[in-house]
Image (tube, grey):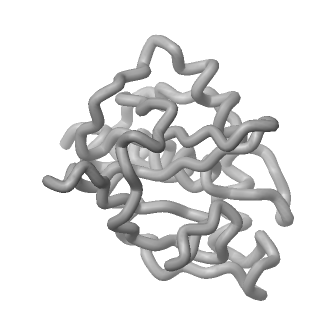
Amino acid sequence: MKLRSKALAIAQSQIGVQEIPKNSNAGPAVEKYLKSVGLGKGYAWCMAFVYWSIKSASIELNVLNPLAKTAGVLDMYNKMAKLRVTTPQPGDFFIMDFGNGTGHTGFVEKVLDNGKLQTIEGNTNDEGSREGYEVARRYDRKTSQMKGFIRF
């Protein structure tokens, strides 16, 4: 199994995981994601979720994790310049840039016919917040909203 497919499957297995308590950036699973990038509870964790999923897949497949160890969305984008792509495929992860150093990320699960993406994201919610409280599947991210995609 390819690393991207395995990482996506691991991310899918986390759908429904929530912060405990809600809106705390804490809880057993969230703290496991944050620990994978060297952080404790209380930090935004969307990039840590992506990193943890890929790290977990790389361990299971006994292959090298290609990502930089960071919880920073834009830091990851900058460090992974060689892996950037502009057209998404399932298993890639997206990068959103909201300015002032803030961003959001998650996995592309499916490219939909309407120009939108079906995604799996940590630190989101059904309203689409980048500071949500759960791992969720989203159907409304527009390709045009993305700074880019990372294919590993």
The one of 4 and 99 positioned closer to us in this rendering: 99
Residue located at (48% from left, 81% from top) = 16
Identify the image quadrant of the C terminus.
Answer: top left
The one of 149 and 65 positioned closer to us in this rendering: 149
Residue located at (55% from left, 50% from top) = 52
| Callout count | 0
The one of 5 and 94 positioned closer to us in this rendering: 94
Q: Relative to 126, say whether 102 is above or below.
A: above
Viewed as shown, does residue 113 lie left or right of 14?
left
Residue located at (40% from left, 56% from top) = 141
Viewed as shown, does residue 126 lie left or right of 22?
left
Q: Relative to 22, say whether 89 is above or below.
A: above
Identify the image quadrant of the N terminus.
Answer: top left
In the image, farthest residue toward the bottom = 21
Q: Relative to 28, say whether 72 is above or below.
A: above
In the image, farthest residue toward the top = 82
- Percent coordinates x, y for residue 14 in the rendering: 45, 71
Viewed as shown, does residue 46 lie left or right of 145?
right
- Percent coordinates x, y for residue 72 in the rendering: 71, 39
Name the image quarter holding residue 80: top right
- Percent coordinates x, y for residue 86 in the rendering: 34, 25
